[in-house]
Amino acid sequence: MKKIDSNLTLLQRLKNAEHFDLMDAVHDEVKQHKDSIEGISTVWNTFYAAFLKEDELYKISLKLEGTSEVKAADEKRDATFLELKREIEYRQYSKTEEEKAAADRLKHVLNNYKQANTAAYAENSAMLTNLIQDLRAPEYTQPVSRLGLSALVDRLEAENNAFKAVYRGRSKEDYLHRQESLSNARAVTDKAFLALTDALNAIYLSNELREKDETVRQTLGGLIDAINSYLLQSEKVYARRVPSYKTTKTGEEGTEEGTDPPVPGEVPRFRMKNPVVSGDPHPNFGDSVGNKWSVEAEDPEAFSAVVYPDAAGGTVYFDGQEEVPAFPVAGFLTADDGVQVNGIIMDQAEGGRNWYIRPFRGSPANPPRLIVDGVTIAILEGVEYPDNMGIE
Protein backbone atom coordinates (compact mmCIF):
# COMPACT_ATOMS: atom_id res chain seq x y z
CA MET A 1 0.00 0.00 0.00
CA LYS A 2 1.38 3.38 -0.98
CA LYS A 3 2.53 5.94 1.56
CA ILE A 4 4.54 9.16 1.55
CA ASP A 5 7.76 8.48 3.43
CA SER A 6 8.35 11.80 5.15
CA ASN A 7 11.64 12.37 6.98
CA LEU A 8 11.89 15.38 9.27
CA THR A 9 15.61 14.81 9.87
CA LEU A 10 16.25 15.04 6.14
CA LEU A 11 14.26 18.27 5.90
CA GLN A 12 16.30 19.81 8.72
CA ARG A 13 19.63 18.87 7.13
CA LEU A 14 18.95 20.27 3.67
CA LYS A 15 20.50 23.58 2.74
CA ASN A 16 18.14 26.50 2.23
CA ALA A 17 18.16 26.20 -1.56
CA GLU A 18 17.64 22.43 -1.44
CA HIS A 19 14.81 22.76 1.06
CA PHE A 20 13.04 25.43 -0.96
CA ASP A 21 13.41 23.41 -4.17
CA LEU A 22 11.80 20.37 -2.51
CA MET A 23 8.89 22.36 -1.10
CA ASP A 24 8.43 24.14 -4.41
CA ALA A 25 8.10 20.78 -6.20
CA VAL A 26 5.61 19.52 -3.59
CA HIS A 27 3.62 22.74 -3.87
CA ASP A 28 3.36 22.51 -7.66
CA GLU A 29 2.40 18.83 -7.55
CA VAL A 30 -0.33 19.11 -4.90
CA LYS A 31 -1.72 22.32 -6.37
CA GLN A 32 -2.62 20.47 -9.57
CA HIS A 33 -4.82 17.93 -7.71
CA LYS A 34 -6.01 19.63 -4.51
CA ASP A 35 -9.46 20.51 -5.86
CA SER A 36 -10.21 16.86 -6.67
CA ILE A 37 -9.14 15.53 -3.24
CA GLU A 38 -11.70 15.91 -0.47
CA GLY A 39 -10.55 16.68 3.04
CA ILE A 40 -7.21 18.44 2.45
CA SER A 41 -8.32 22.07 2.12
CA THR A 42 -7.32 23.00 5.69
CA VAL A 43 -3.90 21.34 5.66
CA TRP A 44 -3.28 22.61 2.11
CA ASN A 45 -4.06 26.21 3.08
CA THR A 46 -1.70 25.95 6.07
CA PHE A 47 1.08 24.50 3.91
CA TYR A 48 0.49 27.07 1.17
CA ALA A 49 0.75 30.00 3.62
CA ALA A 50 3.93 28.55 5.15
CA PHE A 51 5.44 27.95 1.72
CA LEU A 52 4.75 31.52 0.63
CA LYS A 53 6.46 32.86 3.77
CA GLU A 54 9.51 30.64 3.21
CA ASP A 55 9.58 31.76 -0.43
CA GLU A 56 9.57 35.40 0.66
CA LEU A 57 12.34 35.02 3.23
CA TYR A 58 14.43 32.80 0.96
CA LYS A 59 14.40 35.48 -1.74
CA ILE A 60 15.38 38.08 0.88
CA SER A 61 18.29 35.90 2.02
CA LEU A 62 19.50 35.53 -1.56
CA LYS A 63 19.29 39.25 -2.13
CA LEU A 64 21.14 40.05 1.09
CA GLU A 65 23.81 37.39 0.60
CA GLY A 66 24.55 38.51 -2.92
CA THR A 67 24.01 42.23 -2.50
CA SER A 68 26.34 44.46 -4.49
CA GLU A 69 27.29 46.27 -1.28
CA VAL A 70 28.73 43.08 0.20
CA LYS A 71 30.58 42.23 -3.01
CA ALA A 72 31.97 45.74 -3.32
CA ALA A 73 33.22 45.75 0.27
CA ASP A 74 34.84 42.33 -0.25
CA GLU A 75 36.53 43.39 -3.49
CA LYS A 76 37.84 46.54 -1.84
CA ARG A 77 39.57 44.75 1.03
CA ASP A 78 40.90 42.04 -1.32
CA ALA A 79 42.45 44.72 -3.52
CA THR A 80 44.20 46.26 -0.52
CA PHE A 81 45.40 42.83 0.63
CA LEU A 82 46.89 42.17 -2.82
CA GLU A 83 48.47 45.63 -2.81
CA LEU A 84 50.13 44.83 0.52
CA LYS A 85 51.27 41.45 -0.80
CA ARG A 86 52.77 42.96 -3.97
CA GLU A 87 54.52 45.70 -2.03
CA ILE A 88 56.20 43.21 0.32
CA GLU A 89 57.21 40.91 -2.53
CA TYR A 90 58.58 43.83 -4.57
CA ARG A 91 60.67 45.08 -1.65
CA GLN A 92 62.30 41.65 -1.32
CA TYR A 93 64.37 42.73 -4.33
CA SER A 94 65.37 46.07 -2.81
CA LYS A 95 68.99 47.14 -3.19
CA THR A 96 68.94 48.21 0.45
CA GLU A 97 69.81 45.30 2.72
CA GLU A 98 67.68 46.66 5.57
CA GLU A 99 64.58 46.86 3.35
CA LYS A 100 65.24 43.44 1.88
CA ALA A 101 65.58 41.90 5.34
CA ALA A 102 62.38 43.60 6.52
CA ALA A 103 60.48 42.38 3.44
CA ASP A 104 61.74 38.84 3.95
CA ARG A 105 60.45 38.81 7.52
CA LEU A 106 57.03 40.14 6.51
CA LYS A 107 56.82 37.71 3.59
CA HIS A 108 57.21 34.88 6.10
CA VAL A 109 54.14 36.20 7.94
CA LEU A 110 52.22 36.77 4.72
CA ASN A 111 52.77 33.18 3.59
CA ASN A 112 50.39 32.04 6.34
CA TYR A 113 47.57 34.00 4.67
CA LYS A 114 48.47 33.83 0.98
CA GLN A 115 45.02 32.53 -0.05
CA ALA A 116 42.98 34.99 2.04
CA ASN A 117 41.50 36.84 -0.93
CA THR A 118 40.16 33.60 -2.46
CA ALA A 119 38.56 32.31 0.75
CA ALA A 120 34.86 32.42 1.60
CA TYR A 121 33.56 35.61 3.23
CA ALA A 122 33.76 34.53 6.89
CA GLU A 123 37.09 32.75 6.43
CA ASN A 124 38.51 35.75 4.56
CA SER A 125 37.52 38.02 7.46
CA ALA A 126 39.15 35.75 10.04
CA MET A 127 42.39 35.42 8.05
CA LEU A 128 42.74 39.16 7.47
CA THR A 129 42.02 39.87 11.13
CA ASN A 130 44.80 37.49 12.19
CA LEU A 131 47.19 38.85 9.55
CA ILE A 132 46.71 42.38 10.88
CA GLN A 133 47.26 41.15 14.44
CA ASP A 134 50.50 39.50 13.36
CA LEU A 135 51.79 42.56 11.52
CA ARG A 136 51.13 44.69 14.60
CA ALA A 137 52.94 42.32 16.95
CA PRO A 138 55.98 43.96 18.63
CA GLU A 139 58.46 41.82 16.69
CA TYR A 140 57.14 43.12 13.35
CA THR A 141 56.67 46.80 14.22
CA GLN A 142 60.10 47.75 12.90
CA PRO A 143 59.85 45.85 9.56
CA VAL A 144 56.41 47.36 8.87
CA SER A 145 57.70 50.83 9.68
CA ARG A 146 60.90 50.30 7.66
CA LEU A 147 58.84 49.57 4.54
CA GLY A 148 56.36 52.37 5.23
CA LEU A 149 53.40 49.96 5.36
CA SER A 150 51.70 51.20 8.53
CA ALA A 151 49.09 53.22 6.64
CA LEU A 152 48.40 50.30 4.29
CA VAL A 153 47.88 47.94 7.23
CA ASP A 154 45.54 50.51 8.83
CA ARG A 155 43.57 50.75 5.58
CA LEU A 156 43.30 46.98 5.33
CA GLU A 157 41.95 46.80 8.88
CA ALA A 158 39.41 49.55 8.21
CA GLU A 159 38.21 47.89 5.02
CA ASN A 160 38.01 44.46 6.66
CA ASN A 161 35.99 45.93 9.53
CA ALA A 162 33.76 47.75 7.04
CA PHE A 163 33.09 44.49 5.23
CA LYS A 164 32.24 42.69 8.48
CA ALA A 165 29.83 45.48 9.42
CA VAL A 166 28.07 45.26 6.05
CA TYR A 167 28.03 41.48 6.03
CA ARG A 168 26.74 41.04 9.57
CA GLY A 169 24.15 43.77 9.57
CA ARG A 170 23.21 44.27 5.94
CA SER A 171 19.61 45.36 6.48
CA LYS A 172 17.89 47.89 8.66
CA GLU A 173 15.87 45.09 10.24
CA ASP A 174 19.12 43.40 11.38
CA TYR A 175 18.32 40.37 9.29
CA LEU A 176 20.65 37.99 11.08
CA HIS A 177 18.78 38.44 14.36
CA ARG A 178 15.23 39.10 13.26
CA GLN A 179 12.65 36.83 14.83
CA GLU A 180 10.99 36.14 11.51
CA SER A 181 14.03 34.28 10.17
CA LEU A 182 14.31 31.82 7.33
CA SER A 183 15.19 29.03 9.77
CA ASN A 184 11.96 29.64 11.67
CA ALA A 185 9.99 29.76 8.43
CA ARG A 186 11.51 26.44 7.38
CA ALA A 187 10.39 24.85 10.65
CA VAL A 188 6.84 26.08 10.08
CA THR A 189 6.87 24.76 6.50
CA ASP A 190 8.19 21.39 7.68
CA LYS A 191 5.37 21.08 10.22
CA ALA A 192 2.78 21.98 7.58
CA PHE A 193 4.36 19.58 5.08
CA LEU A 194 4.19 16.69 7.54
CA ALA A 195 0.55 17.48 8.30
CA LEU A 196 -0.22 17.58 4.57
CA THR A 197 1.49 14.26 3.86
CA ASP A 198 -0.21 12.64 6.86
CA ALA A 199 -3.56 13.78 5.49
CA LEU A 200 -2.80 12.46 1.99
CA ASN A 201 -1.69 9.13 3.45
CA ALA A 202 -4.85 8.89 5.58
CA ILE A 203 -7.17 9.67 2.66
CA TYR A 204 -5.44 7.13 0.44
CA LEU A 205 -5.65 4.47 3.16
CA SER A 206 -9.31 5.22 3.80
CA ASN A 207 -10.11 4.87 0.12
CA GLU A 208 -8.23 1.56 -0.10
CA LEU A 209 -10.05 0.13 2.90
CA ARG A 210 -13.53 1.56 2.37
CA GLU A 211 -14.56 3.49 -0.74
CA LYS A 212 -12.18 1.80 -3.19
CA ASP A 213 -12.74 4.62 -5.70
CA GLU A 214 -10.45 3.99 -8.67
CA THR A 215 -10.21 7.67 -9.62
CA VAL A 216 -9.12 8.58 -6.11
CA ARG A 217 -6.68 5.67 -6.11
CA GLN A 218 -5.07 6.84 -9.36
CA THR A 219 -4.98 10.52 -8.38
CA LEU A 220 -3.59 10.01 -4.88
CA GLY A 221 -1.33 7.14 -5.94
CA GLY A 222 0.29 9.31 -8.62
CA LEU A 223 0.63 12.20 -6.17
CA ILE A 224 2.23 9.97 -3.52
CA ASP A 225 4.68 8.56 -6.08
CA ALA A 226 5.61 12.06 -7.22
CA ILE A 227 6.25 13.37 -3.69
CA ASN A 228 8.28 10.28 -2.80
CA SER A 229 10.39 10.81 -5.90
CA TYR A 230 11.12 14.39 -4.82
CA LEU A 231 12.07 13.19 -1.34
CA LEU A 232 14.34 10.53 -2.82
CA GLN A 233 16.04 13.12 -5.00
CA SER A 234 16.60 15.33 -1.95
CA GLU A 235 18.11 12.37 -0.13
CA LYS A 236 20.55 11.87 -3.00
CA VAL A 237 21.46 15.56 -2.99
CA TYR A 238 22.17 15.41 0.73
CA ALA A 239 23.98 12.09 0.48
CA ARG A 240 26.44 13.49 -2.08
CA ARG A 241 27.57 15.90 0.64
CA VAL A 242 27.94 13.09 3.20
CA PRO A 243 30.41 10.54 1.81
CA SER A 244 30.30 8.55 5.06
CA TYR A 245 26.93 7.09 4.06
CA LYS A 246 27.73 4.36 1.50
CA THR A 247 25.23 1.86 0.10
CA THR A 248 23.72 0.45 -3.09
CA LYS A 249 20.12 1.23 -3.93
CA THR A 250 18.13 -0.97 -6.25
CA GLY A 251 15.12 0.45 -8.06
CA GLU A 252 12.77 -0.77 -10.73
CA GLU A 253 15.11 0.38 -13.46
CA GLY A 254 18.24 -1.29 -12.09
CA THR A 255 21.01 -0.68 -9.60
CA GLU A 256 22.51 2.69 -8.79
CA GLU A 257 25.61 3.31 -6.72
CA GLY A 258 24.88 6.02 -4.22
CA THR A 259 24.83 6.85 -0.53
CA ASP A 260 22.40 6.14 2.24
CA PRO A 261 19.80 8.74 3.08
CA PRO A 262 20.20 10.21 6.57
CA VAL A 263 18.96 7.97 9.34
CA PRO A 264 16.52 9.74 11.69
CA GLY A 265 18.40 10.87 14.79
CA GLU A 266 21.82 10.05 13.30
CA VAL A 267 24.36 12.86 13.09
CA PRO A 268 27.68 12.70 11.19
CA ARG A 269 30.65 12.12 13.52
CA PHE A 270 34.20 13.27 12.91
CA ARG A 271 37.41 12.41 14.69
CA MET A 272 39.28 15.61 15.42
CA LYS A 273 42.93 16.28 16.19
CA ASN A 274 44.10 18.05 19.32
CA PRO A 275 43.13 21.73 19.40
CA VAL A 276 45.52 24.52 18.48
CA VAL A 277 45.26 27.15 21.20
CA SER A 278 46.46 30.70 21.69
CA GLY A 279 50.20 31.00 21.21
CA ASP A 280 50.58 27.78 19.22
CA PRO A 281 51.56 28.07 15.55
CA HIS A 282 49.26 27.01 12.75
CA PRO A 283 50.01 27.04 8.99
CA ASN A 284 47.21 29.52 8.28
CA PHE A 285 47.37 31.66 11.39
CA GLY A 286 51.01 32.06 12.37
CA ASP A 287 52.19 32.29 15.97
CA SER A 288 49.45 34.58 17.27
CA VAL A 289 45.97 33.10 17.34
CA GLY A 290 44.67 35.65 19.81
CA ASN A 291 41.37 34.69 21.40
CA LYS A 292 40.62 32.07 18.75
CA TRP A 293 41.44 28.39 18.79
CA SER A 294 40.96 25.68 16.25
CA VAL A 295 40.49 21.97 15.67
CA GLU A 296 41.28 19.95 12.56
CA ALA A 297 39.51 16.86 11.25
CA GLU A 298 41.33 13.60 10.66
CA ASP A 299 39.23 13.16 7.49
CA PRO A 300 39.28 16.62 5.84
CA GLU A 301 37.40 15.52 2.70
CA ALA A 302 34.38 14.18 4.59
CA PHE A 303 34.49 17.07 7.08
CA SER A 304 34.55 19.63 4.28
CA ALA A 305 31.62 18.01 2.47
CA VAL A 306 29.37 17.99 5.53
CA VAL A 307 30.37 20.97 7.65
CA TYR A 308 31.39 23.67 5.18
CA PRO A 309 29.74 26.11 4.64
CA ASP A 310 26.86 25.11 6.91
CA ALA A 311 28.90 25.77 10.05
CA ALA A 312 29.08 29.53 9.45
CA GLY A 313 27.05 31.16 12.20
CA GLY A 314 27.03 27.95 14.23
CA THR A 315 28.21 27.23 17.75
CA VAL A 316 30.21 24.37 19.27
CA TYR A 317 28.72 23.19 22.56
CA PHE A 318 30.80 21.17 25.04
CA ASP A 319 28.40 18.95 26.94
CA GLY A 320 28.88 16.92 30.09
CA GLN A 321 29.69 19.91 32.29
CA GLU A 322 27.82 21.68 35.05
CA GLU A 323 27.68 24.72 32.82
CA VAL A 324 27.81 23.96 29.12
CA PRO A 325 30.56 26.02 27.42
CA ALA A 326 29.68 27.35 23.99
CA PHE A 327 32.03 28.81 21.38
CA PRO A 328 30.84 30.51 18.16
CA VAL A 329 32.38 29.39 14.88
CA ALA A 330 34.65 32.23 13.77
CA GLY A 331 35.93 30.79 10.49
CA PHE A 332 37.47 27.80 8.78
CA LEU A 333 40.92 26.31 8.47
CA THR A 334 41.96 25.49 4.94
CA ALA A 335 44.45 23.23 3.26
CA ASP A 336 47.42 24.71 1.42
CA ASP A 337 45.36 25.27 -1.71
CA GLY A 338 43.03 27.52 0.25
CA VAL A 339 39.95 25.58 -0.85
CA GLN A 340 39.54 22.32 1.06
CA VAL A 341 38.30 22.90 4.59
CA ASN A 342 40.07 20.77 7.15
CA GLY A 343 38.87 22.30 10.38
CA ILE A 344 37.08 25.13 12.14
CA ILE A 345 38.12 28.13 14.22
CA MET A 346 36.24 28.92 17.43
CA ASP A 347 36.05 32.26 19.20
CA GLN A 348 36.97 31.99 22.86
CA ALA A 349 36.36 35.68 23.48
CA GLU A 350 32.78 35.67 22.19
CA GLY A 351 32.19 32.43 24.07
CA GLY A 352 32.73 34.38 27.25
CA ARG A 353 35.00 31.81 28.87
CA ASN A 354 38.45 32.34 30.37
CA TRP A 355 40.59 29.24 30.01
CA TYR A 356 42.89 30.15 32.87
CA ILE A 357 39.96 30.59 35.27
CA ARG A 358 38.15 27.34 34.61
CA PRO A 359 40.22 24.66 32.88
CA PHE A 360 38.25 21.50 32.13
CA ARG A 361 37.99 18.64 29.69
CA GLY A 362 35.25 17.77 27.24
CA SER A 363 33.28 14.65 28.11
CA PRO A 364 34.32 11.64 25.95
CA ALA A 365 30.90 10.11 26.62
CA ASN A 366 29.12 13.26 25.42
CA PRO A 367 31.39 14.89 22.82
CA PRO A 368 31.06 18.46 21.53
CA ARG A 369 28.26 19.17 19.09
CA LEU A 370 28.28 21.68 16.24
CA ILE A 371 24.82 23.27 16.22
CA VAL A 372 23.44 25.58 13.53
CA ASP A 373 19.99 27.16 13.89
CA GLY A 374 19.15 24.73 16.67
CA VAL A 375 20.06 21.64 14.63
CA THR A 376 23.09 19.45 15.39
CA ILE A 377 24.93 19.03 12.08
CA ALA A 378 28.08 17.29 13.38
CA ILE A 379 29.59 15.63 16.44
CA LEU A 380 33.26 16.40 17.00
CA GLU A 381 34.74 13.36 18.68
CA GLY A 382 38.13 13.56 20.34
CA VAL A 383 38.01 17.30 21.05
CA GLU A 384 39.16 17.85 24.63
CA TYR A 385 40.46 20.77 26.61
CA PRO A 386 44.00 20.23 27.85
CA ASP A 387 44.44 20.51 31.61
CA ASN A 388 45.95 23.90 31.00
CA MET A 389 45.27 25.90 27.84
CA GLY A 390 48.73 27.49 27.88
CA ILE A 391 47.64 30.80 29.38
CA GLU A 392 49.08 31.57 32.80
Image (spheres, rainbow, N blue to C red):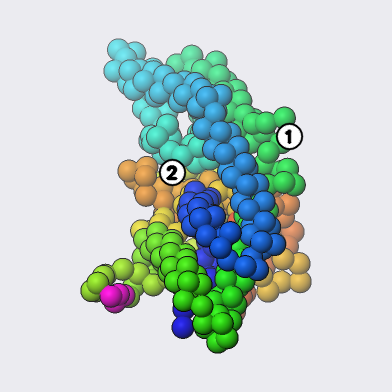
Instruction: Give, as a single range, the part of the protein colored magenta.
Output: 248-252
Q: Position of residue 48 (x, y in %)?
A: 63, 53
Which residue is depicted at the point 61% across and 25% down? 162
The residue to which callout 1 is attached is 173
Q: Quadrant of residue 260?
A: bottom left
Residue 111 placement, left or right of 35? left
Secondary structure beneath dot 2 equals loop
The residue to which callout 2 is attached is 284
Residue 174 placement, left or right of 84? right
Task: Tell me: residue 282, above or below residue 140.
Answer: below
Task: Tell me: residue 25, above or below residue 384.
Answer: above
Which residue is depicted at the point 33% across and 18% down? 90
Q: Position of residue 251 (x, y in %)?
A: 30, 75
Q: In the rendered view of the protein, which quadrant contains the C terminus?
A: bottom right
Queried whether the magenta region covers residue 251, the answer comes back as yes
Most distant residue in the left direction: 254
Q: Identify which amino acid the numbered label 2 is placed on.
A: Asn
Residue 254 placement, left or right of 207? left
Which residue is depicted at the point 62% across and 68% down? 38
Secondary structure beneath dot 1 equals loop
Closer to the camera: disc 1 or disc 2?
A: 1
Q: Position of residue 228 (x, y in %)?
A: 45, 68
Could you say which disc has been placed on residue 372 in the image?
A: none
Q: Identify which amino acid the numbered label 1 is placed on.
A: Glu
What secondary structure characterizes most of the magenta part? Answer: strand
- Count neighbours of disc 1 (C-alpha within 10 A) and say few if under 14, some if 14 to 19, many if 20 or more: few
Which residue is depicted at the point 73% across and 43% down? 178
Q: Earlier in the sequence, mark 1 or mark 2?
A: 1
- Count neighbours of disc 2 (C-alpha within 10 A) and say few if under 14, some if 14 to 19, many if 20 or more: many
Residue 316 seen by the camera: no
